Image (tube, rainbow, N blue to C red):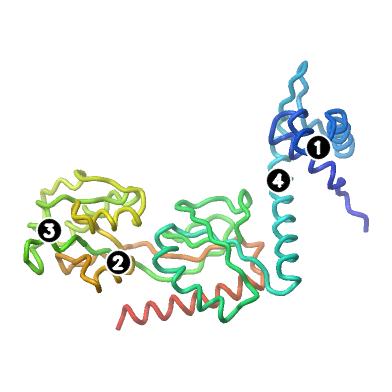
């Protein structure tokens, strides 16, 4: 069956012109003449029977249909390029898995374990990027993401990995020789916050039964990877996931001034689009990741 697909050169010319909103700049990028780009886009419009650009004097802007089609064409060209490069790099064996992960989770938990994955599956490469918030997979090259929050991600498969306990940590110098202090004493210390967890200290003090604390006061840091060094530097007390600071607690660089842990209602999840369920490399990674998560949960329970 003959497919109704325009030629690749027409789609590339359109995507480039749409990205620049200019036929001239598209021609420069593609090393073509402006008239050649104009002919290719006109040929594409004739082929699909829809005007993709509004032409007003010497300016061009995308039509409403053109905006939608440009996004779709860009996504598919990116996917074809990704798959082609993966096939070229691995000569048909294994592949590249594009993974988005929460920054501190990636550096503190995932990356230290990736050596095990590579030794077991040398034919699969993990290309890792950071994303702190959910996104639409269709707008990115990602095959999967590791997400913290609620199990909600439209159009995606969501697989639970593990939960989280948050503990207060600080430099031992702040305790002035004490091993631990009472929660009420902690309320008089500088509280450090992670920007996306603005309610965490309120929940912690509520859990330990301490009231009247102004939990809104204190410096805020965008990432836990910033918050942890701030606590190490003696800038205050931070409330962080326990597994992010295991090394610092073991070395004595950080201490937990109170033994109470706040169990989060949310968790860590592997998320991937429904149309990637059949990906062999993704399923291999998912199986390995769940094994690692189970081992971690068992270690924490023990």
Q: Which residue is mark 2?
A: 245
Q: Residues within 10 Å of mark 1 (few under 14, many from 20)?
A: few
Quarter of the view holding residue 210: bottom left
Closer to the camera in the image, 215 or 114: 114
Residue 124 falls left or right of residue 12: left
Q: Which residue is mark 4?
A: 74
Q: Residue 31 has which mark?
A: 1
Q: Earlier in the sequence, mark 1 or mark 3?
A: 1
Question: Where residue 64 sits: x, y (%)?
Answer: 70, 31
Name above or below for residue 92 compared with residue 204.
Answer: below
Question: Where residue 272 sits: x, y (%)?
Answer: 57, 62
Residues at discs 3 and 4 in contact (Cβ within 8 Å) = no
Closer to the camera in the image, 42 or 269: 42
Quarter of the view holding residue 121: bottom right
Q: Which residue is mark 3?
A: 174
Residue 58 falls left or right of residue 184: right
Q: Earlier in the sequence, mark 4 or mark 2?
A: 4
Q: Earlier in the sequence, mark 2 or mark 3?
A: 3
Question: Where residue 188 sits: x, y (%)?
Answer: 9, 51
Determine the residue positioned at 84% across, 41% down. Answer: 10
Determine the residue positioned at 77% across, 33% down. Answer: 28
Q: Earlier in the sequence, mark 1 or mark 4?
A: 1
Q: CA distance from mark 1 to mark 3?
A: 63 Å
Secondary element at tag 3:
helix
Residue extending furthest toward the right: 1
Q: Earlier in the sequence, mark 3 or mark 4?
A: 4
């Amino acid at each position: 069956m003959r497919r109704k697909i325009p030629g690749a050169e027409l789609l590339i010319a359109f995507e480039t012109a749409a990205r620049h909103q200019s036929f001239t700049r598209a021609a420069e990028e593609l090393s073509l003449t402006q008239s050649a780009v104009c002919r290719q886009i006109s040929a594409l419009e004739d082929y699909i029977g829809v005007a993709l650009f509004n032409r007003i004097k010497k300016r061009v802007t995308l039509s409403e249909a053109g905006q939608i089609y440009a996004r779709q064409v860009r996504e598919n060209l990116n996917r074809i390029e990704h798959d082609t490069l993966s096939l070229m790099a691995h000569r048909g064996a294994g592949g590249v898995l594009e993974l988005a992960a929460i920054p501190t989770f990636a550096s503190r938990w995932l990356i230290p374990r990736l050596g095990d994955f590579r030794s077991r599956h040398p034919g699969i490469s993990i290309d890792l990027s950071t994303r702190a918030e959910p996104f639409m997979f269709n707008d990115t090259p990602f095959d999967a993401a590791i997400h913290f929050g609620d199990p909600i991600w439209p159009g995606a498969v969501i697989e639970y990995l593990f939960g989280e306990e948050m503990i207060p940590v600080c430099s031992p110098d702040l305790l002035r020789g004490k091993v631990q202090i009472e929660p009420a004493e902690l309320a008089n210390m500088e509280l450090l916050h992670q920007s996306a967890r603005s309610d965490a200290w309120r929940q912690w003090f509520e859990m330990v039964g301490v009231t009247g604390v102004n939990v809104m006061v204190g410096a805020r840091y965008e990432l836990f990877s910033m918050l942890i060094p701030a606590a190490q530097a003696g800038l205050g007390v931070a409330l962080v996931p326990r597994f992010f600071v295991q090394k610092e607690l073991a070395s004595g660089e950080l201490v937990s001034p109170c033994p109470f842990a706040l169990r989060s209602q949310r968790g860590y999840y592997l998320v991937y689009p429904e149309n990637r369920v059949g990906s062999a490399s993704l399923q291999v990674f998912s199986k390995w990741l769940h094994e690692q998560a189970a081992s971690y949960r068992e270690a924490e329970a023990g």
